[in-house]
Amino acid sequence: MIEQTLVLIKPDGVLRGIIGNIITRFENAGLKIVASKMQWIDKDFSKKHYSEHLEKAFYSGLETYITAGPVMAMVLEGNDVIEVVRKMVGSTEPKTALPGTIRGDYAHISTKHANENKKSVCNLIHASSNIQDASREIMLWFDPRDMYTYKRSGDEWME
Ligand code: CDP
Ligand code: MG
């Protein structure tokens, strides 16, 4: 089923200058970028994006991490894209993320964000985890007028 998912290249990915490497993986996999923008979010916006984690012990570290610089936000579209992108991203903790995944290949050098005792797992990238989260997150980040429908060469091979 053709779906859409929200992907964020988090501040460590932007500050390390590896936006291009990450986007190339999605393009090579045949996924379509239907919206994108850079945005430096504030604490209020972080609380909306990560609403499911507000009560967690790691939330304050996560908030410091996600607001530490701009993020590159995008909406990707493709067959079963939510599950496919989660697989490409790899597991949350970089040291257990498999080689070949984005976190497994790039995130080992930035596993902790310095914030006194409240450290966050810095893992380069966010991807929506299910269809409900994807639709909520896409609505939070993007105006429908800034999302585009277009044909990519190769679309003729898709059902
Ligand atoms: O991003 P993902 O869906 O893989 O993980 P999550 O469980 O939804 O957590 C969101 C983010 O919070 C993670 O990507 C980490 O950056 C951070 N986190 C953390 O700092 N410490 C944890 N124990 C779990 C998550
Ligand atoms: Mg998550």
Image (cartoon, rainbow, N blue to C red):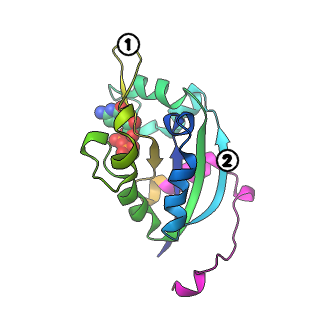
* Circle 2 Cα neighbour tier, 10 Å, few/some/many (<14 / 14–19 / ≥20): few
- Residue furthest to the left in view is 96
Q: Which residue is mark 2?
A: 37
Q: Secondary structure at mark 1?
A: loop
32 in magenta: no
Identity of the residue drawn at 49% across and 55% down? 134
Residue 92 position within the rendered picture, expressed as x and y whole percent measured from the top left: 32, 43
Q: Which residue is mark 1?
A: 116
Residue 74 position within the rendered picture, expressed as x and y whole percent measured from the top left: 59, 53
143 in magenta: yes
Label total for image: 2
Q: Nearer the viewer, residue 151 or 28?
A: 28
| Residue extent of the magenta highlight | 134-158
Identity of the residue drawn at 59% across and 81% down? 155
Placement of 139 over or under 45, stated as above or below: below
Please state which amino acid type lies under the numbered disc 1.
Answer: Glu
Q: Nearer the viewer, residue 125 or 102?
A: 102
Please state which amino acid type lies under the numbered disc 2.
Answer: Lys
Q: Can residue 146 be seen here?
A: yes
Q: Secondary structure at mark 2?
A: strand
